[in-house]
Image (cartoon, grey):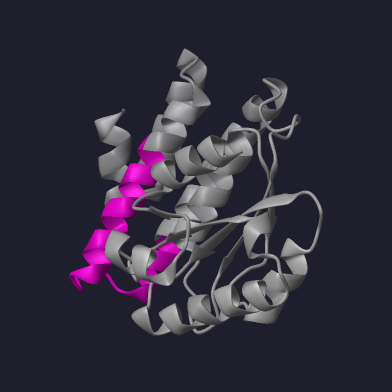
Amino acid sequence: MNKELVNAMADLDRTKVLEIVREDIEKGTDPLKIIDGLSKGVEIVGEFFEKKEYFLAELITGGDIFENAFQKLKPILEKRDLVLKSKGKVVIGTVQGDVHDIGKNIVKTILTASGFSVEDLGVDVKPEKFIEAVKQPEIKILALSALLTIAIDSVKDIIRLLDRENLRSKVRIIIGGSAFTKEIADKLGVDAFGKDPREAVKLCQKFI
């Protein structure tokens, strides 16, 4: 992993991040390795936010820099046919009560780059909207994100509705974000907890 890229991303140095990405592309570096470095940097941004060293503006900036960098990698991923042959379809979204989307967007980006088809429902998503998406026959995984612990109740509502609609056995549920822990995941009865974006993607690959 390129530590210089990780540090530049963590420092929110847009110019440096894009310069390193350009240089790595020119050197023929695996785009997934570049995404790993960007993701690690954004994780550090999230840690700074939790420590109140960064605030919402910095979180938004981090997500914007990540997206700018990914747009430079996207043509290479498509050329390598990493995004054209879907391994399976995942529904992802930030649950109702939470509008944070950086972690969700990173997971979506890596899933797409790894060959998955991803339906992103956005942020502050009502439980009913997740249920409607899961009814699609090709959906195998439901990925739920939250930064705020108040959103945990929304996950409970989603699971309750899935049970009511006899859909719970149809999908694997993965949760991620600082609102959750492995212990909370076990209590909620979901299938897995992704402690970081890369692990969330590995779980999707395992379940598919």
Query: What x and y, as percent, mark residue 155?
Result: 50, 75
Query: What x and y, as percent, mark residue 10?
Result: 28, 50
Farthest-out residue, top: 27
108 vs 47, left or right, is right
Q: Nearer the viewer, residue 35 or 96?
A: 96
Farthest-out residue, right: 137
Instruction: Look at 32% across and 52% down and name the residue there.
Output: 43
99 vs 8, left or right, is right
> Can I make out residue 12 in this image?
no
141 vs 19, left or right, is right
Query: What x and y, as percent, mark residue 2?
Result: 31, 28
Instruction: Look at 52% across and 36% down and name the residue there.
Output: 206
As for residue 204 lying within the magenta part, the answer is: no
The dominant secondary structure in magenta is: helix
Instruction: Look at 44% across and 66% down and name the residue there.
Output: 189
Part of the protein shown in magenta: 37-61
